[in-house]
């Protein structure tokens, strides 16, 4: 079905919104969360301060939405590269091979974490979440937890398929491969790579003890 | 062998040093890393600025040593409570039961992370390490990695005892139970408890897949 083209004012708003997101992410990556201001974002985006206040109430709000948008763009790009429907709801693939599906998604996450466009602003926002409990709670509730719930759904499907023990709590289980990657990246405890996340998945599924 | 009592000047230095550590930890917990200064630490400790500069070159230095000292005190207290030699090198116990030993140490870590004396300054220092690569690298090299190496040693002993698969890399394996706890605490993604860390150990050793 052909889509009607958007009216001029909608296209203009969409353009401003994207410019504001780009400016917010660039600034927080360059100068950090605490020195980023609504004024600075407006100046860099080439819009008036009032344009920002029309849509958002605070810089935390702008940044969270900029991140949500960045995440959606990355997911759509990945879906397009795979030939999948870019408008489809984002989910972890279910090919029936749990290890392969988890490795696939974690490899993509490694690529994203190492992408310079993503790294500086993500680190700045994550750091602010560690310092400020309020920002941290919003960051977790709106950005992190929805991503973790995708793993919960995939692990539940694996339980139904008999590939994960029925008594395992999926919300805890996912942390065995997600949290090590998060800690290495956030605290720079060691390098991250596809080989590393593949190993995490193998250890988590098979366990450290001999079988 | 009876120990000679320390000369007066050594006892005085030791008292000043402890006062400086306490002041540094309290300040960073109350006002954050970036607003804590050598001047502020000196004022709170009741010593001259020069006393601090005689022993340390920067506030990062003072804080790292204050943390090392706090960690040593906690380890000595724990050793004394267990009737062990408080002067002994800190290590993860090896009773021959790997699961029990890991659960024991992780439960103690949960208690420490929930201890208010420890929580505010630890969080402030960890947050600074996320923002500043330089502080982060020192924090990891001097505080975090030495603790992780205790797990590496315990897992190697378990490999020799046939309780962990020989092909497992202990430095990655330990992250399956250490990193989830770190992420929950640091990013406040969910509550931490003894039951939670016990579950992590069981999942990591036995794996998520049916045996």
Image (cartoon, coloured by chain):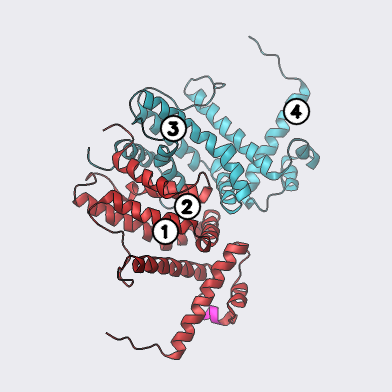
Chain colours: A red, B cyan
- Location of mark 4 (residue): B12
User: Tag on residue B168?
Assistant: none
Which image quarter holds the C terminus of chain B?
Answer: top left
In the image: residue A186, left or right of residue A90: right
Position in image of residue B183 (x %, y %): 45, 48
Q: Is residue A195 above or below residue A84?
A: above
Judging from the image, mark 4 belongs to the subunit labelled: B
* Chain part drawn in magenta: A51-55
User: Tag on residue B187?
Assistant: 2
* The quadrant where residue A111 appears: bottom left
Query: Tag 2: Cα neighbours inside 10 Å, few (<14), some, or many (≥20)?
Result: many
Verify whether residue A52 appears in magenta. yes
> Which residue is at a point 30% across and 54% down the rendered structure image?
A101
* Mark pair 2, 1: CA separation: 10 Å
Q: Is residue A25 above or below residue B141?
A: below
- Location of mark 3 (residue): B105
């Amino acid at each position: 079905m052909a889509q009607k083209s958007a009216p001029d004012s909608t296209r203009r708003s969409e353009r401003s919104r994207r410019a504001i997101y780009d400016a917010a992410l660039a600034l927080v990556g360059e100068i950090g969360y605490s020195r980023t201001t609504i004024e600075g974002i407006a100046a860099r985006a080439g819009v008036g301060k009032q344009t920002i206040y029309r849509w958002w109430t605070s810089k935390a709000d702008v940044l969270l939405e900029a991140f949500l948008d960045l995440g959606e763009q990355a997911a759509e790009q990945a879906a397009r590269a795979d030939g999948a429907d870019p408008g489809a709801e984002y989910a972890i693939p279910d090919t029936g091979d749990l290890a392969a599906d988890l490795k696939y998604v974690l490899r993509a996450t490694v690529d994203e974490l190492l992408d310079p466009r993503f790294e500086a602003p993500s680190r700045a926002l994550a750091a602010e979440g560690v310092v400020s409990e309020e920002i941290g709670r919003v960051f977790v509730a709106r950005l992190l937890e929805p991503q973790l719930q995708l793993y919960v759904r995939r692990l539940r499907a694996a339980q139904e398929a008999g590939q994960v023990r029925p008594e395992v709590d999926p919300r805890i289980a996912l942390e065995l491969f997600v949290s090590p990657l998060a800690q290495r990246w956030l605290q720079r405890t060691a390098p991250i790579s596809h080989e590393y996340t593949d190993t995490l998945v193998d250890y988590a599924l098979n366990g450290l003890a001999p079988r």
